[in-house]
Amino acid sequence: MNKIFDRHYPMIIDGKPVDTDSVSEIRSPFDGELVGTCSLGTAEAVDAAVAAARAAFPAWSGLADEERAEFCQKIGSVFEAHAVELASLITREQGKPLVAGGFGSQFEVGGCIGWSMATSQLSLTEEVLPAGEGLSVVQRRVPKGVVGSITPWNWPLLIAVWHILPALRTGNCVVIKPSELTPLSTLRAVELLNETLPAGVLNVVTGDGLVGAALSGHPDIDKIIFTGSTATGKKVMHAAAENITDCSLELGGNDPAIILPGTPVEAIAPGLFFGAFINAGQTCGAIKRVYVPEADHDALVAALAELAQATVVGNGLDDGVAMGPVQNEAQYEKVRKLTQDALKSGASLAAGGEPVGNGFALRPAILGNCRQDMAIVTEEQFGPALPIVPYPNLEQAIEWANEGEFGLCASVWGGESAERENVANAINAGTVYINTHAELNPMVPFGGVKASGIGVQFGVEGLKSFTDSKVFYERANG
Ligand code: NDP
């Protein structure tokens, strides 16, 4: 295996390594140790990458559908061959443990393999549409051209794959900008994939929000796909509007979980804990607030506290560690502040909340007796702290669950099936889970309503969003 840590990772533009004078050091969020370095890109690097993608587009879009499907499989094989290296890199730059009960960085790379293979199986066929006599109408899906992708720091490589694979599968070329906080796994993956893909088909530029802004406002981008905060999503949409560029936005979530009356709460506690603390809570579609009947509050809080106390938090490279650090200082401070504010306003700390080590690791906090007006309930904490809100009746729980700007996912737990169905129907979210949470599948559309985003990813519907509709009318001669 090549050296993974302490190496320099260049941008890849038109199949070649590209560097600038400005170098960024990427450090582990657990202990501050150097993971590697990369160049900081500029608006000029964005121009060069977009030009390379544009130049590669005619040949790439001209391939037969089966040829691009084969490339997607080859991409999956590259991830498979380099799984250990990529997982180690993700763990060091992002913080999530290698294993973490099956949902760490090895799972993230496994997801990259699975999504690549599944995307190779998806295909958009032409549709023959009803038309008048002597007239035939066919609708085909054609690639948009150059796709700009902007990704966040929580699942850096998996989200990159969610953007890149459907774009390439449908015949587009890509310029990706990873978060400046976690660029290395994407830089390495693009470097590896460029050994397989034609030059210019997949390019990566690094840099901060200004580079992201240069990409989303670029006049020669045909689609922008963005995953990150709602505040930045709005800026991306503004920039895209300037050129009437299509955009897909996967933004924040403040997912509610509603526990129905009469549910044996000890039995569902492990599922709730997993749904809330996957990736130390840094997942858009994780449970961010729990509504439980007043009578069941104490038992649920005790069961979740027991699970929190048993969770080993630490360096993700160490055996047995189930939860890593918060990825960055700003997010760490946000989680701590929201937790402290909740405690000052009357929440009770049943477990966790204290730092581990000298970096940004926190023990998972279980906060009982929370109220709907607390900031930790109304805002997206995006970290290892879970507010539990007792509710007086189900109508009130549904009303609270639907409050706020977000509508990504929600879950309903226990109770009778008719009651579950009624509650699930009453919740305004892109995905409603029943007796589970945070499940994803490459064949199933995923997206949010309200300020959680625009459009869906995955499945045939997700694939279509990387294409334009092109309709052919033909009138028979004579
Ligand atoms: P951002 O939304 O700022 O970052 C996401 C991506 O957008 C990064 O690549 C970032 O670059 C880039 N970016 C920043 N500014 C611009 C811009 N003006 N135009 C285009 N791209 C830009 O997330 P934060 O890191 O600030 O996290 C803040 C909050 O976002 C979190 O607390 C959490 O609530 C939410 N979040 C949601 C995620 C999700 O999966 N839906 C993922 C991550 C965060 P760079 O990092 O280099 O600045």
Image (spheres, helix red, strand yellow):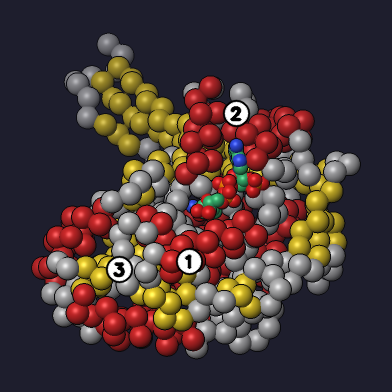
Residue 137 locus on image (x, y percent): 30, 26
Q: Residues within 10 Å of mark 1 (few under 14, many from 20)?
A: many
Quadrant of image for the C terminus? top left
SS for tag 1? helix
Disc 2 residue lies near ligand 1 with CB under 8 A: no
User: What residue is disc 3 on?
Assistant: 389
Above or below, 304 relative to 4: below
SS for tag 3? strand
Write down the quadrant of residue 304 in the picture.
bottom left
- The three-letter code of the residue at mark 2 reads Gly
In this view, the residue farthest toward the top is: 478
User: What residue is disc 2 on?
Assistant: 217
Q: Residues within 10 Å of mark 3 (few under 14, many from 20)?
A: many
- The three-letter code of the residue at mark 1 reads Thr
Q: CA distance from mark 3 to mark 1?
A: 14 Å
Between disc 3 and disc 1, whose residue precedes?
1
